[in-house]
Amino acid sequence: MSSTKLSRMSRTLMSLFAFVAVAYLMLCAALFVFQRALIYYPQPRAIDAPETLLTLQVADAQVRVTVRPHDGPKALIYFGGNAEDVSRNLPDFSQAFADHAIYLLHYRGYGGSSGSPSEEAIQRDAMTLFDMVYNTHPSIAVVGRSLGSGVAVRLASQRPASRLILISPYSSLEDLAVRQFRWFPVKWLLQDKYESWKYAAHITIPTLLIAAEHDEVIPRSSTERLYMHFAKGVATLQVIPGTGHNSISESPLYLKMLGAAL
């Protein structure tokens, strides 16, 4: 092969490499800029009666909370999944947990809450809600499902909750993102990491982890990795057979497990 042909081939390969590198960097930039649109899927509020709605005043937003008031020491605070309208839990929770006041937090951008969701903003709102509820209900069970399990475990490590229930929980959002985007430097791109494993070791209250047998979103390995970070004797892990990530709450065992943990 002549030197001219080799030179042309070399220039072609270099051009191709440069194109691929630029395209890859552009994809990385897009993932960084739009990552929260891939994490959060805000939902409208289905239950909209005035008596079921509380507005939580925080510094930079108005955060809505669906509530079922109840006198007495016990309360339940619930944090939902990334595409969940938490108000839909109100009828079942009200019936199943009749001796608890119920507070279902709509993340920023969800259910009429203003602002945009992010891990730190949601966590500040969660602590503000807990402190408000704690003034009248000294025994608070903190419940988190899927994305909300990361909110719940961090809150319970920082506030005097009485019980912690984690539904379809994960070790960290970073672990899940690495599986989805294995060709990208997720560790450096991801802003909201929800590192639940970090906070699990600080939990001392009775904790229940509930997993779906066939969870197609959160691998069992991630749930079990989180479970191993709790101190011995603090947490238990139960699996609801025949259920998936979205169908777990349809099982008759779901509310029974929550009720037993409460």
Image (cartoon, grey):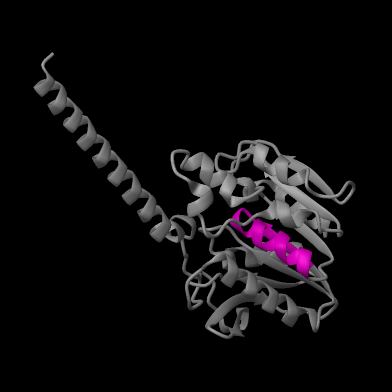
Where, quadrant-wise, is the C terminus in this rendering?
bottom right
Can residue 260 be seen here? The reply is no
Closer-to-camera residue (78/23): 23
Residue range in magenta is 141-158
* 66 horizontally vs 10: left or right: right
Q: Quadrant of residue 88?
A: bottom right
The residue at 69%/74% (across/down) is 127
Compared to residue 149, the image places residue 129 above or below, namely below
* 136 horizontally vs 48: left or right: right
Instruction: Please provide percent x and percent y for residue 152.
Output: 70, 62
Q: In which quarter of the image is residue 73?
A: bottom right
Instruction: Please provide percent x and percent y for residue 260.
Output: 83, 54
User: Farthest right residue?
Assistant: 233
* Residue 183, magenta (yes or no): no
User: Farthest top residue?
Assistant: 1
The residue at 51%/52% (across/down) is 188
User: Farthest front residue?
Assistant: 3
* Residue 152, magenta (yes or no): yes
Where, quadrant-wise, is the N terminus in this rendering?
top left
Compared to residue 174, the image places residue 20 above or below, namely above
Closer-to-camera residue (90/163): 163
Instruction: Please provide percent x and percent y for residue 164.
Output: 78, 59
Can residue 181 be seen here? The reply is yes
* 96 horizontally vs 148: left or right: right
Closer-to-camera residue (87/147): 147
